[in-house]
Amino acid sequence: MRQHDKRSFKAGARFEDAYSLYKFDSELRKMLCSEFEKIEVSIRTRLSFTMSDTSGIYWFIDADNFRDSGRHATLVNKLRDELGRSDDDAIVRFKSIYSNEFPPSWMISEVSSFGTLSMIYRWLKAGHARRNLARFYGLSDTVMESWLHSIVYVRNICAHHSRLWNRRLSINAILPRNTHLPFIKIPVDNKRVYYVMAIVLYFMQTVNPQNTFAIRLKALLLKYPKVDVRAMGFPAGWEQESLWQ
């Protein structure tokens, strides 16, 4: 509601308009969190399945599966901490029966944060398994790594109730040369929320092909017609792109 680089408000600015933007931002964050959750479940499942099939159910404690031994040690310590904080029934039962420090991959993945899963994928050695996981979502492994990092970053913004709608993000999600599934044209600004929402919808084509994210987003924008979508990075004619249809 303030004029750019000034302390005075724009002409005609009303408290009700500011409150409306606040409500829009809250609803947008909740909508995105719902999709992040679905993507996270899919990623943790595919990561565990792909790596266990290739390198055994304890692949995550084998430094040979990772590019950097120091980074791997940090990841193992992070998994150890997350495991120690878990009161999941399956984890408690595992500890009561077995002497292994860690449970198998499919169990450790259930108590790992999305951020940890993203870090694990980032530091996996380049190879068949890493490429296979990315290919499942129709991406190259470098794009997969970048997009996972972007989703985790925006998810943290949402989880901490920070303003999102017109925020300029401090990350730079990779612009793909090509994708196996429909995507958007290269945006003018890939540090706006529009680009991240396009990434979310791209993942949802695989995670849940019957998803209604695009429909619900369009309905939300109609509910708050005063929201300036250009401040979110929406280009002219965005609704006509195949991804959003």
Image (cartoon, grey):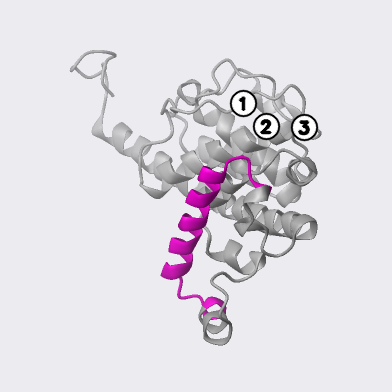
Marks 1/2: CA distance? 8 Å
Q: Residue at x 67, y 37 (%)?
A: 144
Q: Which mark is residue 142?
A: 2
Give the alpha-carbon distance from disc 3 to disc 1, as whole Å: 16 Å
Amino acid, disc 3: Pro
Q: Quadrant of residue 194?
A: top right
Q: Of the numbered discs in the image, which one, if any, rests on residue 182?
A: 3
* Amino acid under disc 2: Thr
Residue 142 picture quarter:
top right
Residue positioned 50% across, 59% down in the render: 79
Q: Earlier in the sequence, mark 1 or mark 2?
A: 2
The structure residue drawn at horizontal position 69% and vertical position 53%, both measured from the top left corner, is 47
Residue 90, percent across and down?
57, 79
Residue depicted at 26% across the width and 29% down the height: 14
Q: Magenta segment range?
A: 65-91
Q: Is residue 192 visible?
A: yes
Few, some or many residues within 10 Å of mark 2 (<14, 14–19, 20+): some
Question: Camera-side residue: 60 or 236?
Answer: 60
Extreme residue in the bottom direction: 97
Count of number-bearing discs: 3
Earlier-in-chain disc, 3 versus 1: 1
Label 3–label 1 contact, CB within 8 A:
no
Mark 1–mark 2 CB contact (< 8 Å): yes
